[in-house]
Amino acid sequence: MTGAATMELTRRALLQGAAATVVALAPGVTLLLGPAPSEARAPGTPVSAKTRWGLLVDVSRYAEVADTVVEACRTENGWTGHGRPLTDPQWVRNVTLNDPRTGAVRTLPVMCQHCEHPPCVDVCPTGASFRRADGVVLVDKHICIGCRYCMMACPFGVRFFVHENVTGQKPHAPRGKGTVESCTLCVHRLDAGRRPACVEAAERKSPGAMIFGDLNDPNSEIARAVGRHVALRLRADLGLDQGVFYKGLNG
């Protein structure tokens, strides 16, 4: 196998989460993906359907961390805007809801919902949109042709077409003009045994505002919280079985 072919397979493995903590770039050359604390999958173990990553947002507390969460995502993944909110990427965007009857105001984050049955994957003509066994929905930038069918299929409006030349890319979050992108649930962190950057940032400012973990593990904090509280999914009527839940969305 040539060096170029080896590098290509390595990039693809990183995107698909098949890589372990140590990734071979070439004979004798490895890439260390970082330390491995707490709640994510142990580094070196393969992605498995035994795990279902999920996120629970406490809407009653989210306003305290809203700006922090967006900034953490932007910094971690290297995306930025150009002053054009209708077309700029927003891997996570804050939405404010107002109830005119009661005056109640709620702010919540809307990002890729990492659906069990993702319509973006169903309509992708090249297979660029795909769902990992652990529930993370991603875009393979190597084969995305920028048709934007996935953007039209997503009921949450959380996929974005890259219109501009990109600069300041992060090695773990490749981007490209003419391709589609969205929240990756910080998959590079998950594969290194860490939590998404937004969750860690929220935790530092308001513990419990966002809880991340394995929904399939009955002893995980998120599984216990989802079972204990009224946790809702956006547009649950669509039957997409998202991995993102919201607590306190109904009052």
Image (cartoon, rainbow, N blue to C red):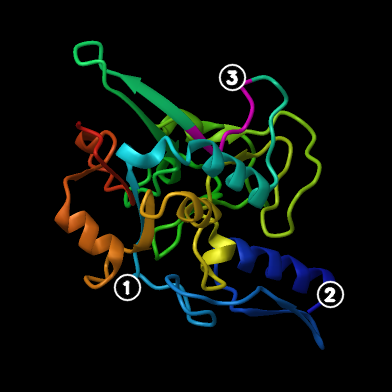
Assign the magenta stretch its main secondary structure: loop
Q: Nearer the viewer, residue 31 or 104?
A: 104
Provide residue 36's location: percent of width, then percent of height. 55, 77
Mark 1 / mark 2, whichever is N-terminal: 2
Distance, label 1 to label 2, CA atoms, is: 34 Å
Displayed quadrant of residue 74: top right
Helix, strand or loop for disc 2: helix
Report whether residue 134 is seen: yes
Q: Is residue 86 magenta?
A: yes
Judge the density around disc 2: few (<14), some (14-19), many (≥20) Cα neighbours within 10 Å. few
Q: Which residue is mark 3?
A: 86
Q: Which residue is mark 2?
A: 3
The correct choice, above or below, for 193 with respect to 75 in the image is below
The correct choice, above or below, for 17 with respect to 113 in the image is below
Of labels 3 and 2, the one closer to you: 3
Of labels 1 and 2, the one closer to you: 1
Q: Which residues are magenta?
A: 85-93
Helix, strand or loop for disc 3: loop
Mark 3 / mark 2, whichever is N-terminal: 2
Q: Is residue 31 left or right of residue 158?
A: right
Helix, strand or loop for disc 1: loop
Residue 50: numbered disc: 1
Provide residue 2's location: percent of width, then percent of height. 83, 76
Judge the density around disc 1: few (<14), some (14-19), many (≥20) Cα neighbours within 10 Å. few
Amino acid bearing label 3: Leu
